[in-house]
Amino acid sequence: MFASEALAGPAFNPLPWMILVPAIGAVTVALLPRSRQDQAKIISLLFAGISSALTVFLLTEFAAHDGGFQFVINAKWISSWGIGWHLGVDGISLFLLVLNAVLYPIAILAVNPGHDDKPYYAWLLLLMAGSMGVFVALDLVLFFVFFEIVLVPMYFLIGMWGHGDRVAVATKFFLFTMFGSAFMLVGIVATAFLHQAASGGPLTFDLVKIATDQSIGVGAARWIFLAFAIAFAVKTPLFPVHTWLPDAHTEAPTAGSVILAGVLLKFGTYGFLRFGLYLFPEAAHFFAPLLLSLGVVGILYGAIVAAMQKDLKRVIAYSSIAHLGFIIVGAFALNVQGIEGAVIQMFNHGISTPALFLLIGWIYERRHTREIAELGGIQSVAPIFAGTYMLVMLSSVGLPGLNGFVGEFLTLLGAFKDARWWGVFAASGVILAALYLLWSYQRVFHGPVTEANRGFRELRLGEALAMAPLVALIFFFGVYPKPVLDRIEPAAKALVAHVAHYSDADGKDIPVPVASASDDGGASDHSGEGSGHGGGE
Amino acid sequence: MSSLLWLIPALPLAGFLIQVVAGRRLGDPKAGWVATAMVGGSFLVSVAVFFDLLSRSHEERRLVQHLFTWVPAGNFKVDMGFLADPLSVTMLLFVTGVGALIHLYSIGYMKGDENFSKFFLYLNLFILSMVVLVLGDNVLVTFLGWEGVGVCSYFLIPFWHTDPANATAGKKAFITNRIGDWGYLVATFLLWTALGSLNYVDLIAKQAGPNPIVGITANMLVLLYLCAATGKSAQIPLFVWLPDAMAGPTPVSALIHAATMVTSGVYLLVRLNPLLEQATWANDVIAWVGGITALVAASIAISQNDIKKVLAYSTVSQLGYLFLAVGTGNYVAAIFHMVTHAFFKALLFLGSGSVIVNMAHDQDMRHYGNLRKYMPITAGTFIIGWLAIAGVPPFSGFWSKDEILSGAFARGGAFYVLWVIGLLAALMTAFYMTRQVVMTFFGPEKWRTLGAEDASADEADSADDHAAAHADDHGHHGLTPDFTPTESGWLMTLPLVALAGLALIGGVIQLPFTAKTKFLERWLEPVLVGGEFHLPHGVTLWSLVVIAVVVAIVGILAGIGVYAQRRIDPAVVEKDAFAHAWYIDETYAAVAAPDGVGRKAFDGLAWFDRNVIDRAVMGAGWLSARTGDSIRRLQTGQVRGYALGFAVGAALVLGYFVTRMGF
């Protein structure tokens, strides 16, 4: 029934199916008879693949020059509470969906769980469904549901298929996020009731409605912004609530690390854009110096701590803290370059870092260790493996010509424009990134081959196939990021205009909005104004 | 002809791709021939573009080709665009020309290496990056090439990566350069906010217009780009990576770490000359950085015993001259000396490679002697390089170095001091190069008498020359008393002869006699907005020339006196501080050493993260879990139950949609 209806006519909206197909897949896999457990992988791949194919369809149908939400579905769900099944996609979420579409099939294909296949794949598919949902939900409650659903499969993936002290780590991960979510829940409820009180209409949790109304008082909005910010800060993660990440990454199974780094971390930064800047523009502007500072601290602190790690996976985990810092700095630069940079950096980090985790996972499969000290000289015995790692690493370093550079450059450019000194300090992250990545590379791949590494096996065909799409994207979007940037730009401009519109007022009487975000689309670039919160020349 | 511009990078790109796909199958030597042919092709196209430009009037000597938009974001837009004008074409000619010769040489030098084709893969990638750097029509495309050459350097320095010293040298080069890159990035941001574009053409127009970038912005821009240039072009304080980079195969040292890549910093500054013209004190900083580097590096070169280390510090010193020229506003002289230096320094490096290969990969000059007898071509060409760098007329280096020095003299004031510094450095240059030539090609055959004292000499050396002892170490030090060196094959001697020819006559592109003989000056005039630089003439000019020649001859005679005739004990001249490179690198190294301050600080932060931040946050969570009644249910043991409940709930919600929404 799916196939026949799925492709019928141009009115087809893939968004709900992108969520539902993997969810149904999860149920299907969970209900597989024990005798057919060995088919779990292929079945999961099928469901994930359909969801991915739908995302590709979405990508082709997406109107590049439209800054508003597209493929919108706005149905009632629990109408008495004003909770809606409101879905939509814009330039900010589009490529995060694409990231899902790329990473989940690869995660399923590239690594085997080793035991308990059925629940493993079922959880992975449920994770996919939740990840899709997070990026398309335009209702506060709906977003919260997806945001929380995702915790469960990740908890089990770490707890059951992880390494080391996995249950404790899974619990830590769970508790950290729950801690943040509690604030967000309070924030959501407060938002809805305050909006109702201010606007006099019915209770609603509709993101777009509340964001365009901007009826909540400035003081309250700032408090609620903080509540959301705590949840997203944990998820991103920002200093000082980041310590769950290295633990979770290190003990998670490879697929878990891939998804965690590639997708789940983006929940935080995406949340900042969608529920920070869009929902509370004035508060976002008000707190921008704080978040810029946390972003810069993340870049420098993450990089320095990464350099001193002894476990290869922890190096990359801390590197994520640094990379996500760039995203925060770009986002809270509050200009087109910064936000475009932030969004494309989310996408690019979601390609490079998962690729590194895959490679490290394969190192672990071969050597049963990730201790840098026990590795060494691998380039001599496995040059293709080493070359692949080198390439991905250079993308992570931010080498121009590879994908990682574009986002890093734009976020820093945006920051420099309107928050000059933050930009200057953040830029020194490029030195540190080279330091910790090249140093770890040298110790793992260069030097004489140790006896234990002599039998290190070269990259296998299956592994190469799993890496191929990521490597292709690394090259392609390094040289030609224009298709991505073109699609992000209208939404980024709209968001910038939205923030500028509401934060330029002095905060006492917020004017009645005259235009929705999408109408503001091509209104102004705003970037020429240079009236930021940074220092002058 | 503009339509052919893309071919210049496309050919080495094609070469690179061929090596990726089929390099191993082509093997030794075919892979090398393919790579050489591609760079040679690139050179031919560059020559064609050169003649095309030459046939045009001055104002029309500018070809621009935009391939596609690279990074568009709001009102920020950067195209993948190429700009061929007299400046970039001058660079192109010597980059691809010298590059092709060094490719050819490498076929001989790398013969039998197990990663033969990989070497040419990197070499082609390097030429591609260098060409992009030179041809970029905006600061960001130049940065693409800038980072590309940096990463190729990082690949090639540890080409024999199983030696940890080589790997460390590669890493050091990249990270040191990244410090400069910070300056490049920040400068680029500032340039964009000031100019609204990153295009050189726009910059030229803006600076020529009524509202140019001036004052503190102009000075800061120059200073930040200088920061970038000190990294790439190995100037104080970031020069420390270049001597270590000698760990790479010698053709790499010649191509990347002498002739081309290390000049990119100077190229960048000359490219930005419209900006420099409006800067004030920042230009003096450039001149002083250059002058001091020239002097300090020359002094270090005096005490080096590794044949390549001498040349490495010599390169740093010569690059200092280029900065001095740029800082004095004497851009023509900077480019002039850049070109002649590319000729004679590539020649000297390739000559040293020829020596090294034929001396069983021993790089210690104290083990050489009398090699002119066994390697007449290498010796003869090396001697031409020596005379060129020492500044003996009529060799090319004489003309170009003299132009830099007289330029400094002409500026007067504090620049007289820089002129004296430049002369002192020239004196030292003549001296250490004479020392090198004498130790290598003249005197007794010292490897014959190595035997017993060898062990102690090596021991004494190992402390300060750790990297050098390992450098170029893909063979063992197999010098025995009955060893007989031989001359290299034609693949290696042909490039030597060609470069020797260029080092001899390279000065003709800019002879100071009349306006007509100053070809380079007229050729570069359209791209240098500062107008012509007035060098002294008449009696002053000739006095300066005489002084320069005297300095060169004194340096050479002193070298002969000390090293050939042994009138003075070399130990008197070879100061400890020189041998230790003024302890600059060692100071840096001490910070990064396992018990160094920097490492300890980093370690401290990692400890802080693990033991303070993590525990504080966990403790706070634990505390709230103890006090908050509702949260207590979520304690460890019950997470599973909660999670399962959540999952069931989620499934129900989804089921609800499926039925309710009527999908």
Image (tube, helix red, strand yellow):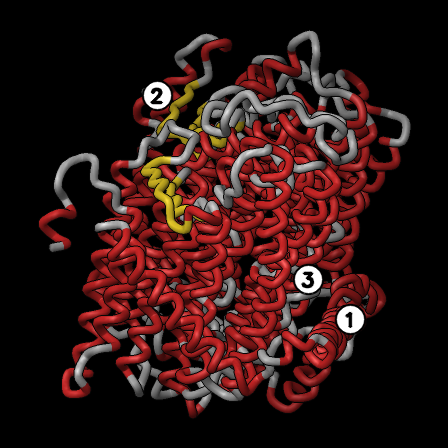
Which mark lies nearer to you, 1 or 3?
Answer: 3
Chain where mark 1 sits: B
Q: Is residue B481 above or below residue A340?
A: below
Let me know if residue A516 appears in the view: yes
Write the residue at 61% across / 37% down: A414
Q: Residue B578 in the image: x percent, y percent?
A: 79, 63
Farthest residue in the left direction? A4
The residue tagged with tag 1: helix, strand or loop? Answer: helix
Q: Nearer the viewer, residue B468 or A32?
A: A32
Q: CA distance from mark 1 to mark 3?
A: 18 Å
Instruction: Locate residue A137 relative to residue A33 in the image: left or right.
Output: right
Q: Amino acid at mark 3?
A: Phe
Circle 3 residue: A239
Q: Is residue B68 above or below residue B462?
A: above
The total number of labels drawn is 3
Instruction: Locate residue B508 relative to residue A425 in the image: left or right.
Output: left
Instruction: Locate residue A364 relative to residue B333 in the image: left or right.
Output: left
The residue tagged with tag 2: helix, strand or loop? Answer: helix
Mark 2 near mark 1, Cβ–Cβ under 8 Å? no
Circle 1 residue: B601
Chain where mark 3 sits: A
Mark 3 near mark 2, Cβ–Cβ under 8 Å? no
Q: Nearer the viewer, residue B226 or B438?
A: B226
Q: Is residue A240 above or below residue A458?
A: above
Q: Amino acid at mark 1?
A: Ala
Write the residue at 68% across / 36% down: A282
Circle 2 residue: B2
